[in-house]
Amino acid sequence: MIRQATLEDVSALASLSLQLGCTGDTTEIITRLEKIIIQENAALFVQEVNGTIAGWVHVYGKTFLRMEYCEIGGLVVDESQRRSGNGKELMKKCETWALENGYDQIRLRSGAERKEAHQFYENIGYERVKKQEVFTRKL
């Protein structure tokens, strides 16, 4: 079953985030989840398998003067649940959400080192469109 994430899911989201290589700090995740939940142009879905959260995906709309689309903010499926169709189902949920919210394109970014993830995205119909450098400045 796929559903919207709630604050009660924080422990599972934190645990799965560690598998993605992100923070598992529940305080940070609560703060961010509270922001995501109230956004009209964003959703965070979880997938339950036998009463346990097996994965999550974050999708949000982006509007620029020159274009608009949805972007995947993160996708992770528990290591024990990978290659069982859960990731594909979560991505399909995002595609449905995007269409229901007036978007006709989904984009995602994936680190160069994540070769298995790249293969997964290509296998479910996503196309590589460019390579880019990402710049940041800590404020």
Image (spheres, grey):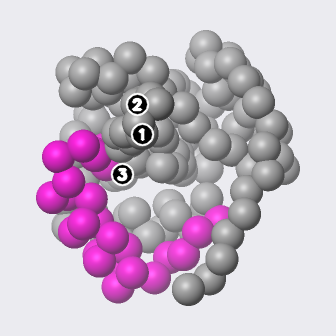
C-beta proximity under 8 Å, tags 2 and 1: yes
Residue 76 image point, x, y percent: 53, 48
122 or 66: nearer the viewer: 66
Secondary structure beneath label 2: strand
Where, quadrant-wise, is the C terminus in this rendering?
A: bottom right
The residue carrying mark 2 is: 68
At a point 44% along the width and 70% down the height, the residue shown is 14
Q: Is residue 91 visible?
A: no
Q: Amino acid at mark 3?
A: Ile
Is there a contact, CB below 8 Å, between mark 1 and mark 3?
no
Q: Identify which residue is drawn at 61% across, 59% down.
A: 20
CA–CA distance in space, label 1 to label 3: 34 Å
Q: Are marks 2 and 3 in contact (CB under 8 Å)?
A: no
- The reply to whether the magenta stretch includes residue 115 is no
Q: Nearer the viewer, mark 2 or mark 3?
A: 2
Residue assigned mark 3: 53
Q: Earlier in the sequence, mark 2 or mark 3?
A: 3
Residue where numbered disc 1 is placed: 64
Residue 97 position within the rendered picture, expressed as x and y whole percent measured from the top left: 27, 27
Residue at 78% x, 44% y: name it: 132
Q: Where residue 83 sits in the image (x, y, percent)?
A: 62, 30
Closer to the camera: disc 1 or disc 3?
1
Q: Is residue 39 magenta?
A: yes
As measured in the structure, the alpha-carbon distance from the residue carrying label 2 to the one carrying label 1 is: 6 Å
Q: Which residues are magenta?
A: 21-47
